[in-house]
Amino acid sequence: MKKNIVSLMFLASVLTLLTSCGGNESKQNATKQETTESKKAVTQTEAPSKAEAPKVETSKEMEEFLNMFKGSASDVAAAIDKFASPALKYHEMKGYDLKNPKVVAKNEDCYTIETNPGTVAARGFVVCWSKGKINRIDYNGLLNVK
């Protein structure tokens, strides 16, 4: 009798395993199709790759200021010294090795710039002007930190 009970339990386990794991190809195909369709939907709804943003119109002074950024902190300091108002003698921007600055936005007399694009040292700043001189610089921090 013990042998029959063990045999019945084994047979029940095998049947349970077979019905839960296999034999239902239409269910598996439906799951594959749903996965494929959901991947297509995600791909179609993702934002397009960053295309070149339209160029932001800048003042002559801002262009000259940014053209002085050659990659060393001393270049940045010289640019700030040349264009800063007397009230802005020192700014932390002078301590950074910045290059390839790009104006990404403008709001009245303030320009948002990004420097060192594509690197871990990419930084953002807002530079504000009044009467041909920089009167404020805000540091927006590292740009590639997630």
Image: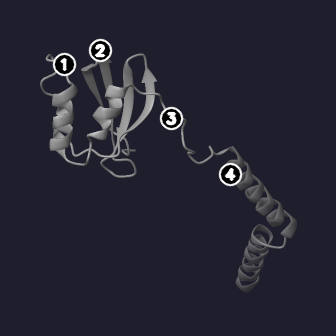
The residue indicated by pointer 2 is 130
Residue sitting at 22 percent across and 46 percent down?
Answer: 97
Q: Give the side of residue 60 with respect to residue 73, left or right.
A: right
First of labels 4, 3 by sequence position: 4
- Label 4 sits on residue: 43
Q: Nearer the viewer, mark 4 or mark 3?
A: 3
Residue at image location 80% in from the left, 65% down from the top: 28
The quarter in which the C terminus is drawn is: top left
Residue at (80, 60) in percent of width and height: 33
Kindly give the residue lying farthest to the bottom in the view shown.
3
Q: Nearer the viewer, residue 26 or 115?
A: 115
Q: CA distance from mark 1 to mark 3?
A: 27 Å
Q: Earlier along the polypeptide chain: callout 1 or callout 2? A: 1
Residue annotated with mark 3: 55
The picture places residue 111, in percent across and down from the top left corner, at 38, 26
Q: How busy is the neighbourhood of tag 4: few (under 14 within 10 Å), some, or many (20 plus)? A: few
Q: Residue furthest top?
A: 131
Question: Marks 2 and 3, Cα distance to the nearest angstrom?
Answer: 22 Å
- Do the numbered discs 4 and 3 sit on residues whose CB atoms are within 8 Å? no
Kindly tell me whether residue 140 is visible in this rendering: no
Image side of residue 22 versus residue 68, left or right: right
Residue type marked 1 = Ser
Pointer 1 and pointer 2: residues touching (CB < 8 Å)? Answer: yes
Q: Amino acid at mark 3?
A: Lys
The residue to which callout 1 is attached is 85
Name which residue lies at 35% across and 46% down: 100
Question: Whole-Å distance between the Cαs marked 4 and 3?
Answer: 28 Å
Circle 2 or circle 4, nearest the eye? 2
